[in-house]
Image (cartoon, helix red, strand yellow):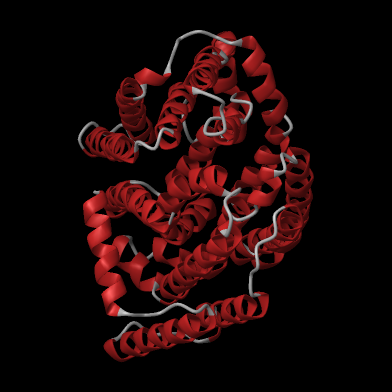
Amino acid sequence: MYKSLLKNASLYSISSLIARGFSLITVPIYTRLLSPADYGALDLLSYLVILMPLVMGAALDQALARFYNDAADEMEKKRISSSILIYTIFIFVPFIPFVQPLSTVLAEKWLDGHVDEGTITLVFLLIWTNAISSIANNQLIYMFRSKQFALCSIGNTIVSISSGLAFVAYCRLGLSGILLGQLLGQSIFGLVSLYFGRSNYLFKFDWAIFKKMLAYSLPLVPGSLAFYLMQYVDRYAINQFNGLSDVGLYGIGARVAMLINLFLMGFQGAWSPVVMSGFREAGAPKKFRVVFNHYLFVVLAILVSLSLFGKEILLLLTTKIFSQGFVVVPLLVVAVILSSIGQYFTYGIQIAQKSGLRLLLNLLALVVNIALVYLLIPKFGMIGAALATALSFVVLTVIGMALSQHYYYVPYRWRKILTATFIAVMVAHLVFIVDFQVNLQTELFKLGLVLAVLLMLSRLLDIKLDPRVLVRARASMLSGA
């Protein structure tokens, strides 16, 4: 299990690394061509592209994750894949007549005329292509075709970003240029993903199987929507209280925090199929505990590193005005880590098919988040928004893990886990207490602090920091690639 997990995670991580690397290339350029308000509008529109397919797609991607590798035979797998794809393609068609009037309302009322109707129309086209492309890419994951998945992810990123940069820098299309580039990349490599997975499609809609999947996935829609709103409601509240410029500064800090996804995205692609195909095996819970300890070690190390060096990263990548967003990095990294644990390690709920619990959990956390956002932002601004997000994910993850343990017990060593987490969080938030100056002495001190924390975490989480292990891991990654 470990070898397969490492190999697939390596490929997903490599594709994620390249994607995020190209994304980082755009930051120094866009922050010099766009204002904080432009960046704020881009942030809000980007999250609309994520949320709409989630609602319209009826969370069928989660049904694919649950039922595909548990299907009785290859024919049933094909019926599952085909039914989901056909639904995703045609569900948006009835809404085409409403695109233009909605574009007018969103441009004038929501974004105060900062963007035009044509830009909003591009967003709706991107929503459609993103939904189809995501389903096609997820299909490759559950077919264990990690190489093809990586190729499509990397290709989409390169085309989207390079064409977007050309449209912005040379054609002067602003936000529309960025969205147009994304539309081009998603369209091309969505088709490529469908080609790679063509052997798994019948292009025949099976209503009986679809009803079974829909019965599983529909209760997940409100919960999934609540889960994602928890991550994005802070932006909308900041826009309401402080305006698009603060959304832009907050968003650029969030971009640094999201660098942790260089690891998380690769892990997600490899881990979910492993859990759902192997949870019945003898000794699986102990293996899952080992994976969790290593996962926690890596994410806490990233938390400390990104938090202590967040200011330097932003000064390197952006202008001075954008670098003010570093203050939200530690809290947002904590929120991302908690979010990932709540997704990847509460598989007991998924195994027990208790999708209704997901709904209740996510709705509870969303209510907590909204209450905290509107309480803390007027008093603490961006930091209040980040704190509200982190605390809501504490609620979600703690209760989710307790329920998951009830349905599928894993022998975690909670005292050591909580001690390691406390140490990492405290060190990460030193940036709130100490005004670190950007100079060589300070950088060396922070580097030493990171190494000291790594040693403590390795002892608490039973991680052997053996260079030979790292060499073998690197060789395995290269072999997988």
Query: Taking the image as drawn, is residue 114 in sight?
Result: yes
342 up-or-down from 466: above or below: above
The residue sitting at 48% across, 72% down in the picture is 297
180 up-or-down from 264: above or below: above
Instruction: Measuring from the top left, give residue 223's x and y in whole percent.
Output: 71, 40
Instruction: Measuring from the top left, give residue 479's x and y in whole percent.
Output: 22, 53
Instruction: Measuring from the top left, give residue 426's x and y in whole percent.
Output: 57, 82
* Quarter occupied by the N terminus: bottom left
Seen in the image, is 413 located left or right of residue 430? right
335 or 77: which is nearer to us? Answer: 77
Which quadrant of the structure image shows residue 138? top left
Seen in the image, is 182 located left or right of residue 92? left
The residue furthest front is 282
72 up-or-down from 94: above or below: below
The residue sitting at 45% across, 67% down in the picture is 324
The residue sitting at 49% across, 85% down in the picture is 459
The residue sitting at 48% across, 86% down in the picture is 456
